[in-house]
Amino acid sequence: MTLLNAPAYNERRERLIRTLLVSVGAVFALLLALTLAGFISGHGWLFSNLYTEHRVNDFLTDIEQNNFDAAYGIYQNDVHWQQHPDKYSGYPLQRFTEDWTKFSPVGPIHSHHVDKSVSDGSGPFGTTLIVASTINGDKAKRLFLAVQRSDGTFAYPSPHVFEY
């Protein structure tokens, strides 16, 4: 093919290619912005930790409202725990209730705010998620709960804490 017999200019095709390139660039930029925003705000890459943070929020709300049956179900990641209490005989509801009332490390919980979460362990998203919460508006009373990614159960105390 020579310059004298080049194909005719197809404006529709060129507009389609330009639109596709701009769209792919915009989607890539948005994905990058969401990835970094989630990490910088402390909610995991692409906000992947939000589900677990909501579970911790529900758990602490149930503790505030003295709904220990529901809180225990969240803690054990088994909402039907009452149908098989023998499974949890190592840490029964009575002991759980005492731990979060009489022996609570932060005292009675009247209000809370889930602040941040950090992945811990091996792998790209870690094996454990450590969720930090401020209790009763007092920054000196921070509660760190560990949530196992494999089975969704909670653990207290957390294997370690972090500064923020």
Image (tube, rainbow, N blue to C red):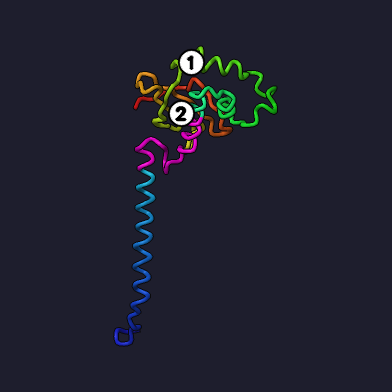
Specify the farthest residue to the bottom.
Answer: 4
Residue at the spot x=65%, y=31% of the render?
80
Residue at the spot x=35%, y=58% of the render?
25
Q: Which mark is residue 78?
A: none
Q: Is residue 3 left or right of residue 150?
A: left
Q: Measured from the top left, where is residue 128 in percent x and y?
A: 50, 30
- Quadrant for the N terminus, please: bottom left
Along the line of sight, the residue nearer the viewer: 145 or 112 = 112
Q: Is residue 51 left or right of residue 42?
A: right
| Front label number (1 vs 2) | 1
Decide: is 98 above or below 81: above
Q: Residues within 10 Å of mark 1 (few under 14, many from 20)?
A: few
Q: Measured from the top left, where is residue 41 in percent x and y?
A: 35, 37
Q: Is residue 73 left or right of residue 143?
A: right
Residue 38 appears in which quarter of the rendering?
A: top left
Amino acid type, callout 1: Ser
Q: Is residue 44 magenta?
A: yes
Q: Measured from the top left, where is residue 118 in percent x and y?
A: 42, 32
Amino acid type, callout 2: Ile
Q: Is residue 28 left or right of residue 97?
A: left
Specify the farthest residue to the front.
Answer: 65
Q: Which residue is mark 2?
A: 130
The tag earlier along the polypeptide, 1 or 2, is: 1
Decide: is 22 above or below 104: below
As measured in the structure, the alpha-carbon distance from the residue carrying label 1 to the one carrying label 2 is 18 Å
Stretch of the chain drawn in magenta:
37-58
Q: Which residue is mark 1?
A: 104
**Element under label 2?**
strand
Q: Residues within 10 Å of mark 2 (few under 14, many from 20)?
A: many
